[in-house]
Structures are given as structure tokens and as C-alpha cells.
Image: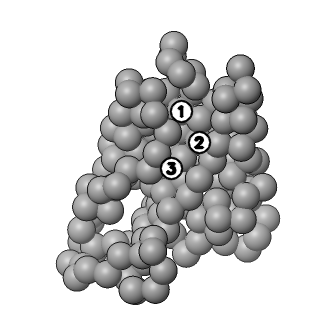
Amino acid sequence: MMRRFLVAALAVTSLVLVGSTAGSATLSEPRQAASAAVTPTPAEQITPQVRQILDDTNAIRAQNGKPPVTLANELNVVAGNWTWHLHNSCTFAHNPSYASQIPAGWSSAAENIAAGQQPGSVVQAWIDSPGHRANLLGDFTHLGIGYVDGPSCYQRYFVQVFARY
């Protein structure tokens, strides 16, 4: 019970990858020129839970003078696959290879993960954490969202994958 409470209250973590070599969570590798690398997700394909997370993310960005991020099919696949992995393996960790799964052309990327939250409160939990807030307000143009709710250790798992194209 204590483990579940701690995860629900605080189990959010972030990772940022940028085209530099500073810090342990950075990545430096050549990028191809951007060319229609990602496609927007049609509105009819967005679940209510993902819509809530996207809207909450863009609301906090607007409140801070940032442009909205566009939900992208290809980033949804990266986020969604990792969300299912976390759910099925009953684990809570960053995707160690998400950067290589993002379509070529990005100049910076970041990942937020959470478990045990509700769709209506997960973005606020990320906002309340300096690292996650930095990702939410980062210089990103696109976002992928993964969400799974089912009988597993933490029941609900969330992944955001940000990229700048």
C-alpha cells in the first residue's frame, strides 16, 4: 500500500535529450534534415484521456507564453509502446532507447513518465516537478502520449515523448 501511495503521489520522472554533450541525460548524434518526419494525429483518433493530457499540456504552455505542441502519430507509437511495456512488465522506468525510436530530424527530445495518477491530474503532477515542468514548457513542437489503464501494479501508466522538428 505504501509503495502504491508513493507512486501515485510522486512517481513522475523526466529525461531530456538535446544535441549537446553536457550532463548524464544528454545525447549527441547527427540528425537528418526534417522532412515531414511526423504527421498530426487526426482528432477522431484521440481518446478522451489522451485529449485531456494534450489539452492540459497545451494549457500550461499557453499560460507560460509557449506555442502548443502538435500530437504526432509517430511519437504516439513510441510513447504508447513504452506505456504498454511498463504496464505489462509491472515496472517504472524510462525508455532507454526512445531517442532512436523517434523519426529522424528532431533537434531535441524529452520524455515524462508517470504511474498511478489520473488522466485529469497527471499533468499537474508533472507541473509540480521542476524537471517535468521544464519538459512541458520546453522548446518542443510535437508530442506523443501513451496511456494504459488496466489491472497491473500501478493500474494507470502515462508516457509523454516530446520532440522539436
Q: Secondary structure at mark 1?
A: strand
Is label 3 or label 2 in front? 2
Going from the N terminus, do you reach mark 3 or mark 2 first? 2
Which of the 4 image quadrants contains residue 131? bottom right
Q: Position of residue 118 (x, y in %)?
A: 69, 30
The kind of residue tagged 1 is Tyr
Q: Give the farthest residue toward the front.
A: 2
Q: What residue do we see at 45% from left, 34% from top?
A: 91
Query: Compared to 153, does 51 lie above or below?
Result: below
CA gap between label 3 and label 2 equals 9 Å
Per the image, the residue denoted by label 2 is 114
Per the image, the residue denoted by label 3 is 160
Query: Compared to 47, does 57 lie above or below?
Result: below
- The residue lying toward the viewer, choosing from 95 and 160, is 95
Going from the N terminus, do you reach mark 1 or mark 2 first? 2
The kind of residue tagged 3 is Gln
CA gap between label 3 and label 1 equals 10 Å
Q: Are marks 3 and 1 in contact (CB under 8 Å)?
A: no
Per the image, the residue denoted by label 1 is 157
CA gap between label 1 and label 2 equals 6 Å
Question: Looking at the rendering, in which quadrant would you find the N terminus?
Answer: top right
Q: Residues within 10 Å of mark 3 (few under 14, many from 20)?
A: many
